[in-house]
């Protein structure tokens, strides 16, 4: 199945030079919109729009729980400024076409990526799982529960994680964590999504640097 890429803006999922671009054609059964906005096209098997933290419904509209078409959302998980991971979160709506879903999954898996399917909720699976944990780790650091190094060591050796929460946040950028966590807090209002103090400071510093 052929695919076409329409570059509408900067892409976090597929930055310039990514091998995924090599397989694209001038026209295709599937069209991917990298960076908003996107345009509906019922003549395609599937239309894929790249998401950040927002819902697919922001782009397609919603209709009392009956929304769905050949349009799906997707996001390749990426920890802040780190390189994109091998995981694609594929977003469907309640009445999404099963043939479009199958085609999108086959496209990404054919490119060597792993696919997880999520309902259309802000933050999808990963961010809704990890942002509260990162905020808790930042709170523990402020409270003096343990040093950053000791928390990271505990997670690596005690829980088998590849890295600890503080080193992961530092590497990906605390300001990036602020943006993702604040977006979820604005939607859900859950206290666990409220960005930690250190992330808020990092975001404020980027704004101050931008004003300089």
Image: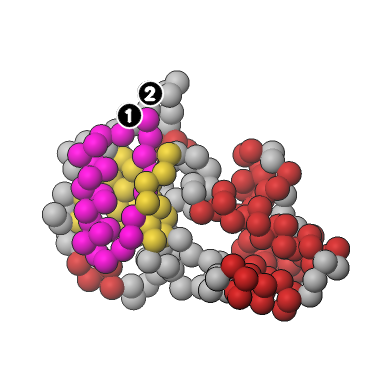
Q: Taking 41 as reference, is 62 left or right?
A: right
In which quadrant of the rendered view does residue 135 lie? bottom right
Residues under numbered marks 1 and 2 in contact, where contact means CB atoms less than 8 Å apart: yes
Q: Residue at x 34, y 43 (%)?
A: 72
- State which quarter of the image contains the N terminus: bottom left
How dense is the environment of label 2, judged by Cα within 10 Å: few (below 14), some, or many (20 and up)? few
Q: For the magenta stretch, what is the residue range?
A: 90-115
Q: Residue at x 53, y 74 (%)?
A: 162
Gap in angstroms between the C-alphas marked 1 and 2: 6 Å
Q: How is the image coloured?
A: secondary structure
| Local secondary structure at mark 1 | loop
Residue 88 covered by magenta stretch: no
Identify the image quadrant of residue 186.
top right
Q: Secondary structure at mark 2?
A: loop
The numbered dot on residue 127 is none
In the rendered image, which quarter is residue 17 located in?
bottom left
Residue that mark 1 sits on: 95
Q: Nearer the viewer, residue 158 or 146?
A: 158
Number of the label disc, if any, that sits on residue 66: 2
């Amino acid at each position: 199945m052929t695919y076409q890429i329409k570059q509408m803006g900067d892409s976090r999922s597929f930055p310039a030079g990514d091998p995924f671009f090599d397989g694209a054609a001038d026209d295709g059964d599937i069209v991917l919109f990298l960076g908003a906005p996107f345009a509906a096209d019922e003549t395609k098997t599937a239309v894929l729009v790249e998401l950040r933290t927002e819902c697919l419904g922001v782009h397609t509209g919603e209709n009392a729980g009956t929304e769905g078409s050949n349009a799906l959302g997707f996001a390749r998980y990426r920890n802040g400024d780190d390189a994109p991971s091998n995981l694609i979160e594929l977003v469907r709506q309640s009445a999404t076409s099963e043939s479009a879903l199958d085609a999108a999954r086959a496209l990404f898996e054919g490119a060597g990526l792993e696919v997880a399917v999520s309902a259309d909720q802000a933050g999808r699976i990963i961010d809704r799982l990890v942002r509260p944990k990162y905020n808790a780790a930042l709170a523990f650091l402020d409270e003096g529960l343990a040093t950053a190094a000791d928390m990271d060591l505990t997670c690596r050796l005690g829980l088998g994680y590849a890295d600890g929460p503080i080193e992961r946040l530092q590497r990906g950028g605390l300001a990036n964590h602020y943006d993702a966590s604040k977006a979820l807090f604005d939607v859900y209002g859950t206290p666990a999504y409220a960005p930690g103090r250190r992330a808020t400071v990092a975001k404020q510093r980027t704004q101050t640097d931008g004003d300089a």
